Amino acid sequence: MALKWGICSTGKICSDFCSALKTLPSEKHQIVAVVSRSQETAEKFATTFDISKTYSSYEKFAADPDIEVVYIGSSHTEHVRLSILMLKAGKHVLCEKPLSDTLEDVKLVHKVAEEKQLFFMEAVWSRCFPLYHRIKEEITSKSIGAPQMVSARFFVSFDYIERLKTQIRAGFLLDAGIYTVQLACLVYGEEPVSIKAVGEIAETGHDIDGCIILSYSKGQKACLMYSSKVKGATNCASIHGTNGSIEIDDHFWCPKEVKLPTGKETNEIPIGPVPFYYPNSGGLCYEAEEVRKCIKSGITEYANYTHKDSEMVHKIAEEVAKQIGRKLPYGKD
């Protein structure tokens, strides 16, 4: 029986998610409703993706008995509120990252999900890619020996300050740097014993770039970089161990290819019926399918990105934000 999705918001990432959903068998996934603050916008989105029901009220949407799981792709400032609203209405939730600016709120949402015994996942889609499963298998099998160094970079070039004037952004650490942090957490599976970070802060209080050095209990380290001011970079990542290395292809957070000790491996990036806004967004189908497997099996946390994993990432990000001087709420003392 198909998992019945409700889509919360109609922005670019929601469009990409729905297009990716449409690459999966209809007997496994069905989009039954969409909500937006504007009824007109919801109806336009519904026409694009052949969705039967539209809402301009989040409360009425949450009360729809046909919806089993809600994908939340709204502005990050609404993620906590909407996640709690949907959970309390009895819906499973897949919420886009970042779940929140603060670890306290991340824990609050997880607590509600656990009390309601419902599936909840912060949508760090990297962890759902087949190649990420292979990376984890290689690390667990010790094919590269003991991991010693992780490096990752997420560089793009655009006027982040100008974009802040028209969009509510989380700051580039949580927009992009979070992907570098999650990779280090995946490799080492523990909290770092030391966090050192530097970064540039805009007048709004947002961070626009940063460099993070993490040190771990056995001397292992991670060098993580993110920037909205670098043009033409290849956004790769590498994991170096005592006996070998793993190299992750460009767009390391949603890769097409990885070089393992046994050679190169690839995973498919499906092409959706509606053009994608972001690189490799066809890979969102892997996230949707992992969510389906969990819900249909009665599992409330995704094993490859548990609540504990999410909290570890946000704990690191919160300390980085503190060190580089990011202000919360943005633009206020």
Image (cartoon, helix red, strand yellow):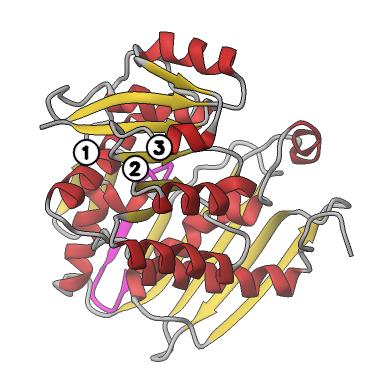
Q: Which residue is mark 2?
A: 255
Distance from disc 3 to disc 2, alpha carbons, whole Å, reads 37 Å
Q: Which residue is mark 3?
A: 63
Q: Which residue is mark 1?
A: 267
* Residue at image point 76% right, 62% down: 328
Q: Position of residue 84 (x, y in %)?
A: 48, 54
Check the picture and name the quadrant holding the C terminus. bottom right
Which amino acid lies under the numbered mark 2 shown in the image of this protein? Pro
Which amino acid lies under the numbered mark 1 shown in the image of this protein? Asn
Q: Position of residue 12 (x, y in %)?
A: 53, 27
Residue 194 in the image: above or below residue 200:
below
Graded by Cα atoms within 10 Å as few (under 14), some (14 to 19) or many (20 or more), the crowding at tag 3 reads: some
Q: Are marks 2 and 1 in contact (CB under 8 Å)?
A: yes
Check the picture and name the quadrant holding the N terminus. top left
- Magenta span: 240-254
Upstream in sequence: badge 2 or badge 1:
2
